[in-house]
């Protein structure tokens, strides 16, 4: 017997994949579009490496600072 959660995850995955496949022509580059200049190496690293690491650090810091379970254990 299939687990309900596994079945639900499969249905959601299949639906999401189907929607992405159907919408992919909408993201295709049409004639006349100008994508503009590309990013250099530093901009690419900043956008795809430094920014996610910084966001992770900020969110983790906020979670640690606002964690109330540690305060309850010490008191």
Image (cartoon, rainbow, N blue to C red):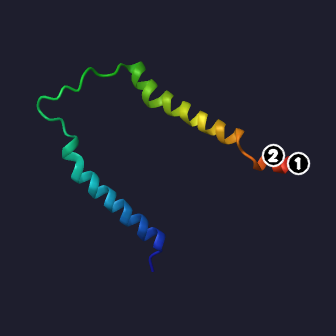
User: As drawn, which residue projects farthest toward the bottom?
Assistant: 1
According to the picture, the residue beneath numbered tag 1 turns out to be 75
Q: Residue at x 35, y 19 (%)?
A: 40
59 left or right of 44? right
Q: Residue at x 45, y 68 (%)?
A: 6
Q: Is residue 13 above or below residue 24?
A: below
Q: Return the residue nearer the eye: 42 or 18.
A: 18
Q: Residue at x 50, y 27 (%)?
A: 50
Considering the numbered disc 2 on the image, is that residue within a helix, a strand or a loop?
helix
Considering the numbered disc 1 on the image, is that residue within a helix, a strand or a loop?
loop
**Percent x, y of residue 27:** 23, 41
User: As drawn, which residue projects farthest toward the left?
Assistant: 31
**Percent x, y of residue 33:** 16, 29
Q: Residue at x 45, y 80 (%)?
A: 1
According to the picture, the residue beneath numbered tag 2 turns out to be 71
**Percent x, y of residue 58:** 60, 34
Residue count near mark 2 (Cα–Cα under 10 Å), binned few <14, some 14–19, many ≥20: few
């Amino acid at each position: 017997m299939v687990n309900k959660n596994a079945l639900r995850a499969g249905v959601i995955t299949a639906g999401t994949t189907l929607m992405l496949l159907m919408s992919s022509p909408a993201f295709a580059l049409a004639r006349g579009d100008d994508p503009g200049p590309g990013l250099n190496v530093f901009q690419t690293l900043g956008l795809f490496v430094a920014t996610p690491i910084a966001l992770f650090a900020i969110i983790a810091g906020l979670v640690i600072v606002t964690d109330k379970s540690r305060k309850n254990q010490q008191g």
